[in-house]
Image (cartoon, grey):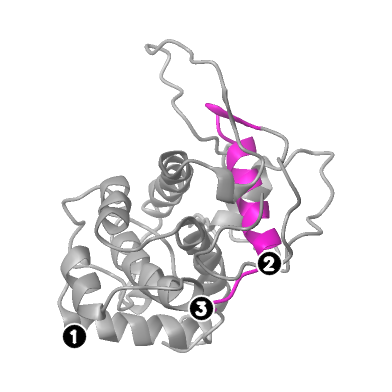
């Protein structure tokens, strides 16, 4: 879809969409300087009147849990903790963006006819279990969402788009960032869509993102640190070693 295909403005009363960078910007510490590690600028697709989002359980009926320290570097993080961070961000986006009225002109190939029966957390874990999904390929999905939202002003991650978008993003990220990856036939089977549909989703994704699939390690570290710092259940520990300037695939950086 063209970047200009859906450039019409929403009515003043309609809530503005949320993207990962917009949510993270709302929760950034007031004394924090603009990120010097990221070439990705924060987008402005956020509602100024909405309460600042925060991840983790806020249910008063549940006992408060002490914050657990996560490693300072994203590639040292346990995959399950990384899944939790990414899942909670996606749930925040879905919860807010589902409140935005959906118009026929907003429909994209990423929209499902109905909300899938599997939660996005279970879907992410299924993709990781049955494919060679490395940590950078999990985290880079959020970067890709920002890049697509910048180029498609009316696109949102919501209950109808998140699964198909994640599937296409994982396929493209695995091919761009990992030393090994599965076939599209396998990805389609794991993702619960047909091979023909996955091929179309992959082409659409690459066209929209203009094949900008590579992401530097500092950019991914910036997203990771921001996710941890805004989560109720986690705190960010000090990095145990130097931070590489580039990410070069599935191989782990030196300790």
Q: Left or right: where does residue 131 sit relative to residue 188?
A: right
Are circles 1 and 2 on residues that touch, CB within 8 Å?
no
Assign a secondary structure to mark 3. loop
Assign a secondary structure to mark 1. helix
Q: Look at the image and tell me in which quarter the N terminus lies.
A: bottom left
Residue closest to the eye, 176 or 226: 176
Q: CA distance from mark 3 to mark 1?
A: 31 Å
Q: Which residue is mark 2?
A: 40
Residue closest to the eye, 102 or 241: 241
In the rendered image, residue 193, in percent from the top left (x then y), is placed at 17, 71
Q: Nearer the viewer, mark 2 or mark 3?
A: 2
Residue 192 makes an appearance in the image = no
Q: Which residues are magenta?
A: 213-236
Residue 230 is a magenta residue: yes
Q: Which residue is mark 1?
A: 196
In the rendered image, residue 221, in percent from the top left (x then y), is placed at 65, 53
Residue under the image location 44 percent in, 42 percent down: 88
In the rendered image, residue 10, in percent from the top left (x then y), is placed at 50, 67
Residue closest to the eye, 169 or 240: 240
């Amino acid at each position: 879809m063209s970047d200009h295909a859906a450039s019409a403005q929403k009515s003043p009363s309609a809530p503005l969409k949320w993207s990962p960078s917009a949510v993270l910007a709302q929760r950034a510490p007031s004394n924090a300087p603009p990120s010097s590690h990221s070439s990705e600028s924060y987008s402005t697709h956020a509602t100024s009147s909405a309460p600042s989002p925060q991840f983790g359980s806020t249910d008063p009926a549940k006992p408060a849990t002490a914050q657990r320290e996560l490693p300072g570097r994203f590639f040292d993080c346990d995959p399950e903790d990384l899944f939790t961070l990414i899942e909670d961000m996606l749930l925040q986006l879905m919860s807010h963006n589902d409140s935005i009225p959906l118009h026929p002109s907003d429909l994209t190939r990423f929209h499902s006819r109905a909300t899938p029966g599997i939660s996005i957390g279970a879907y992410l874990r299924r993709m990781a279990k049955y494919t060679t999904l490395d940590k950078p390929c999990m985290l880079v999905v959020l970067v890709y969402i920002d890049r697509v939202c910048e180029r498609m002003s009316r696109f949102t991650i919501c209950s109808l788009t998140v699964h198909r978008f994640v599937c296409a993003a994982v396929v493209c990220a695995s091919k761009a960032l990992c030393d090994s990856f599965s076939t599209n036939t396998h990805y389609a089977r794991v993702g619960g869509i047909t091979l023909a549909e996955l091929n179309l989703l992959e082409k659409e994704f690459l066209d929209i993102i203009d094949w900008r699939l590579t992401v530097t390690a500092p950019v991914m570290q910036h997203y990771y640190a921001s996710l941890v710092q805004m989560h109720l259940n986690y705190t960010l520990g000090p990095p145990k070693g130097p931070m590489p300037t580039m990410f070069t695939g599935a191989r782990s950086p030196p300790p």
